[in-house]
Image (cartoon, grey):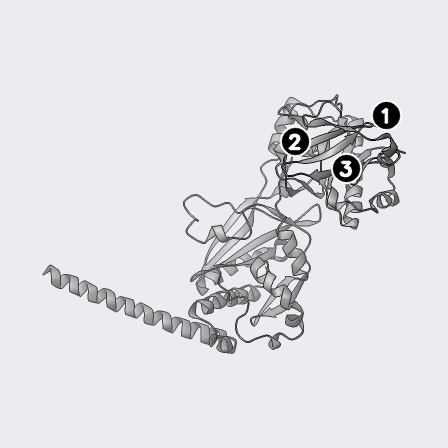
Amino acid sequence: MQRVNKNIMLAVLTAASTLFLLFQLYYYRYYISTKHGPAFSKLKGSLSAQDGTRWKVVKTFFNLVSNHNVPVFLLDSQILGRLRNDLEQLRSSPDSLPPGCQYFCKQRDITTLGLLDKTWEHKVRGSIFRAAEKLGFQWQKYDGRDPRLEGMDDLSGTEIPLHYIFKMAAHTIHLVVFYERSGNYLWHGPLRLRRNMDRKFAPFRKLQFGRYAGAYSSVDLVQITVDRVKVKIPRDPSHFLSEVAHSRFLECRYKEARSYFKLYPDDLSLEGVEFRKKAKALLHLAAATLDSLGVSFWISSGTCLGWYRQCNIITYSKDVDLGIFIQNYKPDLVPAFQKAGLSLKHKFGKVEDSLELSFLGRDDVKLDLFFFYEEQDYMWNGGTQAKSGKKFKYLFPKFTLCWTEFLELKVQVPCETVAYIEANYGKNWEVPVKVWDWKNSPSNVLPNGLWPVDEWDETIQLF
């Protein structure tokens, strides 16, 4: 009897598997060929079933957003990397490319798209999700706090959508939502998974965006036809891809800053307020000048400490400090700053060794440019005592650069911020120190010899 039951069960399972296979074959033949019409008929001869599924999912999603006037654009690094080589041909004569699916059907699990939040009408959001479900998509929304609304007085923020995941069959569409920030740049938030809920929903480890928050220049978009799908892409894919590699964004630590000011009340004197106003103007001017030269920089020393510790300029610092890698130095840097209205205060060292520039702003706030040199195990910048010719060396552990927003400016900071600050200010960097000797106070300063007297005219220049 048991043997008969087993045979019956096996027969039922076999029949069910056969019916499911027939249903899949019918579904893909009917749905893809009929719903997508001639476009797919031209492609299907050169596609495997898996490739056809990817193309079908992408095509269906683009039809969905087009019908709801949601202007998404292509972010996917893999696809953009291939597209940039064929961009001119795609713009001028897309039909001249080899037949078949060249971009969306390449083996991968995820296609990544972007969306500017301000271009998406709130009234269509509910309807597009209902339409997506009817088409067979499963979807998830991932929210986070709006950092534009957070600050020293209000840490609550407001929940905003940051990422959407749409899944159909074996393919996933990752939609990244971008927001404009006050520093005139685009920002997207991190993707935070919910415990025990999302890890099996999509291949999250393969997502190109979302591990960290990211910052980008404003994107100029153009529309092209890719694999018979109309899609918007960045006008300059190479520039966008270069930004992807260095897009990580660090938010100012408002909660910690508020705790700091409970211990050490903020300087709200007229002099302090005026200095911060002048320092902010100088930082913006310096950034514009360096950007016009194509010189990458980051906020360093006391300016970096002020950003990380209290989300503001330290009023008793009396200057603005920037770091620049020596390989990014350009001879026209000094003339550019002078043209911008800053006078050269001193020039110490030389390009090969310990270069340092100091300018005086229109409001008598000093701007210091420290040039950093890289060794095998560490990085360093130099210092020079003008009256003696003594050289000093400030050692830092190796670091990379991230973006942040500081004083309404998108600017770079060391990603390894704590290690960078501790190198300069020691373990007690959270305690303000108003008396500072640049030759002895830093934790990372070392003597570095003397400038030869016959080089003083070049290496010790005071103006």
In this rendering, position of residue 226 left or right of residue 268: left
**Residue furthest toward the top?**
435
Circles 3 and 1 in contact, beta carbons < 8 Å? no
Looking at the picture, does residue 356 appear above or below residue 80? Answer: above
Circles 1 and 2 in contact, beta carbons < 8 Å? no
In this rendering, position of residue 52 left or right of residue 296: left
Q: Which mark is residue 421?
A: 2
Q: Earlier in the sequence, mark 1 or mark 2?
A: 1
Q: Secondary structure at mark 3?
A: strand
Q: Secondary structure at mark 2?
A: helix
Q: What amino acid is labelled 1 in the image?
A: Lys
Q: What amino acid is labelled 2 in the image?
A: Ile
Tell me if mark 2 has few (under 14), some (14-19) or many (20+) residues whose alpha carbon lies within 10 angstroms of its own. Answer: many
User: Residue 360 at x, y = what percent?
Assistant: 85, 35
Question: The C terminus lies in which quarter of the figure?
Answer: top right
Q: CA distance from mark 1 to mark 2?
A: 29 Å
Question: The N terminus lies in which quarter of the figure?
Answer: bottom left
Q: Residue at x 76, y 48 (%)?
A: 291
Name the residue carrying label 1: 387
Question: Which quadrant holds residue 413?
Answer: top right
Residue 398 visible within the image: yes
Q: Earlier in the sequence, mark 3 or mark 1?
A: 3
Tell me if mark 3 has few (under 14), some (14-19) or many (20+) residues whose alpha carbon lies within 10 angstroms of its own. Answer: some
Name the residue carrying label 3: 353
Of marks 1 and 2, the one in the foreground: 1
User: Residue 72 at x, y = what percent?
Assistant: 59, 60
Q: CA distance from mark 3 to mark 1?
A: 18 Å
Q: Earlier in the sequence, mark 3 or mark 2?
A: 3
User: Residue 308 at x, y = what percent?
Assistant: 65, 33
Q: Secondary structure at mark 1?
A: loop
